Image (cartoon, rainbow, N blue to C red):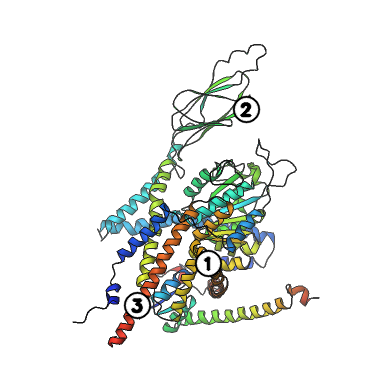
Amino acid sequence: MAREHWSERLQRFDRRWIFLVMAVAVVVPLYFPLGLPARPDPMTKAAYNAVEALPTCQLDPVTHRPVPGSPRCARVFISIDLDPASTPEVEPFYRAVVLHLKRKHAQLVIATTWYQAPPLVERYLRETLDVAIAPAGTDGYAGAPDRAYERNVDYVNLGFRDGKGAIIQQFGTDLRSAFDGRADDGTPLDRIPMMQGLNKLKDFDLIVLVSAGSPGAKEYVQFVGTREKLPMVAACTAVSTTDLAPYFQTGQLVGLVGGMAGSAGYENLVGKPGAGTAGADVLNIANLVVIAAIIFGNVVFFAGRAHRRRGGRS
Amino acid sequence: MQIAGTAELTQLPFFITACDYTLIGEELYAASAYLTKEPTLLANLKAADAFKIAAMLFIVIGVTLATMGVFHLGPAVFK
Amino acid sequence: MKKTVPLVIGMLFGAFALAEFYIPHHQVGALSNEFRSWAAILASSAFIIGGINILQVTWPKIRRREPDWGYKVVLLAGAAVMLLAGLPWHKLGDAPTHPTVTFGPRLPAPAPGEPPAAPAVFVKVPADVTYQIGATVGAGTGRLEVVRVAPGEVTIKLSRRVPGYATLETKATLIERDTITVEGDPPMMWGRDGRVFVWIYEHVFGPANATLFALLAFFVASAAFRAFRARNTEAALLLGAAIFMMLGRAPLGGAISDVFPDFAQWLLDVPSNGGRRAIMMGAAIGAIATGLRVILGLERSHLGND
């Protein structure tokens, strides 16, 4: 009886060994980080520069209100369209960009078009806007400190609206009617001073899209961005980066932060490493495992094919 | 022999590496029109091809005009 | 009639959506906004129809004890629990919205030459409640705590550290030597922002949702060994590009050499964008053709089969 070739034995390799190697590759770097610096790619740098170019207003240190005569505070619309599954990839960018915006004392309007997002959005607002992300004296952070924001004074949460492309189109023509003229907590938008003059997306200085899929950045570009020529920065999952990269190349997106690697790069630029930087170490090792699996699998495949050709069997 | 087809671009790499032949995007719809010879599908395909030729024509005209520095057609035509 | 009316509706609204781009009159824009509001309402009502449909499809399978009927019970039970937890039951009762503020005896007058006594706020709240008296934020201990504030209007807020509880808020105007006692226990809320709904979302839905996505990592590794074969030129090019992209996008590639991130960016900017753009144009043209077929009433697949 012919002896089984090593390639045929390996073809029947129990895939649970691969699962185990992958599990070790994911868990070990979390406890023993490599500490490699996350180099931001050109699209991430463009996103950072777009936010950095926003005006920084002067605030009274006691009342935290704009000083009369100083530049108007930047007004930014943030659409948080994600679910718990995509938080490792885009949440680090969200936290970094909110710190970046708070350093500029920007006024923020937050909304979401995903039905799974509202409880997540509430948690993000509690953890990043209602408190200071990086107050003075934060360990490992050398940038300007931020402060706690006040709901309906420094930021407004409009809440969730369903409707995919149609509702995004309505954001572009009449944002207030899309939310029935009220914030998520029921406060009439007419009674919120920071909402004065903000009636549609064109009235904002920048649109930030934290997008994990559809509806998301692509729909914003297709339905309102190009039509109204809006300055938009998007963060997306790694798998959607190739989908959105053409829009960055044509200038329809002024910045694109792709996946956890992009988020880690943005954290690096902002100066506050977080979950993205920690996850980048996992990315290093996990990618090496996948590359090794591809190479090894093909070596086994070609060795088996050569063996079959030599033996004359099909 | 494995043939796969998808209009979902994110699935393409997996099909290309795992299957013998892959139909990309509208090739899937073209394949169904080709195999079934259904008039509706064939008409759809012909219409899409006509649109594509028109789009190619506009791209060539646009690239030529942009190369000549003409970015607004109105003033160039109606001087 | 059953198919004609939806066809006519599709034709009219589709034609209007197209005409909006060519008629700049403000009334057309206002009407378009109105139609988009209708579309948003219809999209939201689809959730209710979807829920009813789930019940219609799943209940007969449970009754007939089809294979895996137990999972259908879990599905319906989970939906029912979230529906009940998501209703604002707390609005049925008389839940307090303000903390209890009681004015007490005034502090004794200061001796001559001494500054006037600042108002004192005595706070007595449970241990897991946070209080904010003016600019002072503190944690409740269950015992009486005292906070001195400046005279004037003072905002008093009581809230719990965990989400899902109401915030009790009020204002009080105090002058020198005033004393007030603040008491309160923020009640639990129900509904989308309520304790139960948020707890289930953060401890059940969130981890389950994340786990399903996390499994992909293992399946991709397994597929990389067993299925990703360079069986032809296109597959070999794709695998080579994938290896360069994986190395280039992770910090490790940049640490080895600048070639990897630069080449990965070139792959994204040139071949990938070029091919992706072509496919997107083809898909867009297909969408135009389908849209025109709906507007002209030639497309009937969205009406379903009889």
Nearer to the camera, C200 or C108: C108
The answer for which chain carries disc 1 is C
Gap in angstroms between the C-alphas marked 2 and 3 = 78 Å
Say which quarter of the image contains residue B57: bottom right
The answer to whether residue C231 is above or below residue C94 is below
Which disc is residue C153 wearing? 2
Specify the amino acid type for callout 2.
Glu
1 vs 3, front mark = 1
Q: Position of residue A239 (x, y in %)?
A: 48, 65
Q: In x, y percent, where is residue A263?
A: 53, 57
Pointer 1: residues within 10 angstroms few (<14), some, or many (20+)?
Answer: few
Q: In this view, does A131 lie above or below A166?
A: above
Q: Which of C252 and A270 is in front in this view?
A: C252
The CA distance from mark 1 to mark 2 is 63 Å
Residue at image x 39%, y 45%? C84
Q: Which residue is drawn at 55% across and 53% down?
A: A267
- Quarter of the picture holding the N terminus of chain A: bottom left
Query: Which mark is drawn over residue A301?
Result: 3
Q: Which of C297 and A11 is in front in this view?
A: A11
Q: Residue C257 carries which label?
A: 1
Judged from the image, the secondary structure of the residue bearing numbered disc 3 is: helix
- 10 Å neighbourhood of mark 2: few (<14), some, or many (≥20)? few
